[in-house]
Amino acid sequence: MQIDRMEFIQELEVEQQLRENIRKVIKIVKSRKKQQLLEAQEEEQYLRNVIRKLIAEGSTPDQEPAPAASTGINVLEDLLKKIIPVLQADYKLLTTDEQQRQSFRAHVLNGVKNTIAPMKAVLSAPDPDDDPESLEEVVDVDIGDEEKFIDIEDKPEEEPEPEASPEQEFGAGLEDHDETGRNMAFQTYKKIESNIVDSYDLIANEEDRALFYDYLLTNLKLYFDKFEDELAGNLQEPTTPEYEKAKEDPAGGMDTGLDDPMAAAEDEEIALQEIYIQL
C-alpha cells in the first residue's frame, strides 16, 4: 500500500509538471502569435506607405516640364491650364440631359471661333504703308431719271424688331440648340474669353498662330469628350481577381495571400489540449 501510494503521488507530480509545461507552451505560442501579428501589421502598413508615396510621386507633374518645339503650343498649354478647370466645373453642372451639354459644347467652340476670327483678319490684313494704292477706290455713280425723284409721302412707321439678348447674340447661328446649355456657355465663356484673347495676342508668328488656333479647338473637343465620359460614369473602377472572387462568394472570405498567425496558434493550442486530455 505504501508503494502504491508513493507511485500515485509520483504520477500526480508528473501530471502536475506536465500541466505546467503545457501552460508554458501555450503561453509561448500565444506570445509568438501576437508578435507575428504585430510584425505582419507593421509590414503591411510599411508597404501601404511606400505605395502611397509612389502614387503621389507619379501623379505630381514636373516642376519644369520640357517646352514644346512651338511657341504657339507653349502658349496654348499655359492657356489650357487656366480655362479647362472653369469649363469642366460648369459643364458638369448640366446633368438634366445630354442636349444641354451638347449645346454648351457647341456654343463654347463657336465662341472661340468668333473671338479669334476678327483677330486673325486684322493680323493678316496688309499694311497700308506697304501699298498705298490698295486703299484707293474709284467710285463711278450713274444716277438715272428715276433716282432723281423725291418721294414726299409719309410712310407707315415699321415696328422695330426686338433687340436680341446678349445670350441670343452669343448663340447666333445655333438657334436649334438647347437654350439652357447656351445660357450656361455664355456665362462660362465670359470667364475665359479674356484669357483666350490675351494668349492669342501674344503670338506674332503666323505659323504659331495657326498651330495655337487649331490645337485649341482640337483640345477643347477632346476635353469635352473626357468630361462626358467622366459624367456618364464610363470609367471602370480598378479591381483584382481576389476581390472579384470574394464578391462572388462572400461566405468564403477573401484570401489575402498571408498566413493567419492567430489561426496557427489556435491549432497548436488545440493540439496541446488534446495531449493534456489524453493524459
Image (cartoon, grey):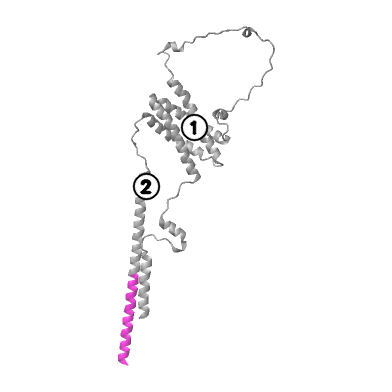
Horizontal and vertical percent for residue 165?
Answer: 59, 28
Q: Which residue is mark 1?
A: 109
Work out which residue is located at the far bottom of the displayed protein and give it: 1
Horizontal and vertical percent for residue 176?
Answer: 58, 33
Magenta region includes residue 58: no
Q: Secondary structure at mark 1?
A: helix
**Mark seen at residue 55:** 2
Horizontal and vertical percent for residue 28?
Answer: 32, 69
Indicate the quadrant where residue 3 lies. Answer: bottom left
The residue segment tinted magenta is: 1-27
What residue type is disc 1 on?
A: Leu
Quick check: 221 above or below 272? Answer: above
Report the quarter where the N terminus lies. Answer: bottom left
Which badge, 1 or 2, comes first in the chain's sequence?
A: 2
Of 265 and 216, the residue lying toward us: 216
Crowd band around label 1 with a 10 angstrom C-alpha radius: few (<14), some (14–19), many (20+)? some
What residue type is disc 2 on?
A: Ile
Of 1 and 221, the residue lying toward us: 221
| Left or right of 140 on screen, residue 12 | left
Indicate the quadrant where residue 206 lies. Answer: top left
Q: Are marks 1 and 2 in contact (CB under 8 Å)?
A: no
| Left or right of 47 on screen, residue 173 | right
Report the quarter where the C terminus lies. Answer: bottom left
